Image (cartoon, helix red, strand yellow):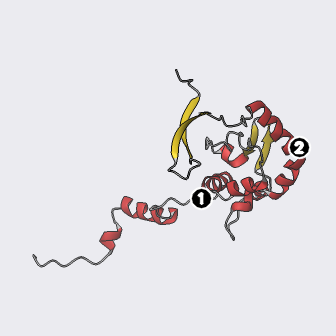
Amino acid sequence: MMEPDTDLSFSACSSLDGGSAVETPTKQTKLEPPDIDIDAKEMRQMFVKRWQRLGKGWQKKFLIGNCLPKGVKPQTAAAQQLANQPWVFGAKSGCGCLPCSKANTGSEWGLATAGLVPKFRACFLQKHQECKSHIDAVKMMLGIGVDVPGAPPLEEFESLLKKLQSGSSMRSASKPIKSDFG
């Protein structure tokens, strides 16, 4: 009877007299991958040590307003001040993002569980800062309108709504269409 952790494979060997190769079965035990899984508690401890060493530098570098396109600035003084604050924070559970947390994105950044990897680096923070969900969360936090595809600007919509309420519309203001039937 064969053991459950064995694998039969064939190895080729040649005869000494120059004849054809003969395949004979060889018994090999399955190799298990080395246990490299680090438990969550250990990973959190590693993150806390790394955050204590590098966190202040990351907070100086990764500010809420960094992801805004050139020329886009928050409207109010409070929002401008908020834009100059760090978005990244450290917790015992991991690394978090303030705008994503406030926007309830449900991502690991919003839940402050990011960074629980063996070699967490600043490039992970940069990548998150450039992602669309983070940028949208920042715009929402700073009161900058997030564009909705297909929606007209608010001023245009209000103007059209007033015209409709007064009994006229954009169509009635334009030239009537001539018909061949009458």
The answer to whether 170 is drawn above or below residue 27 in the figure is below
Q: Circles 2 and 1: CB distance less than 8 Å?
A: no
Image location of residue 48, percent across then percent down: 84, 39
Residue 162 shown left or right of residue 70 in the figure:
left
Instruction: Pick the quarter of the image with the C terminus.
Output: bottom left
User: Is residue 98 in view from this perspective?
Assistant: yes
- Give the residue at x 87% y 41%: 49
Instruction: Provide the residue designation for mark 1.
Output: 145
Disc 2 on helix, strand or loop?
helix
Name the kind of residue labelled 2 in the image: Gln
Say left or right for 14 vs 157: right
Residue of label 2: 52
Q: Residues within 10 Å of mark 2 (few under 14, many from 20)?
A: few
Q: Amino acid at mark 1?
A: Gly
Q: Position of residue 134 (x, y in %)?
A: 65, 53
Placement of 116 over or under 60, stated as above or below: above
The answer to whether residue 75 shows anywhere in this view is no
Q: Residue at x 59, y 27 (%)?
A: 5
Which of these two is toward me, 31 or 162?
Answer: 31
Label number found at residue 44 = none
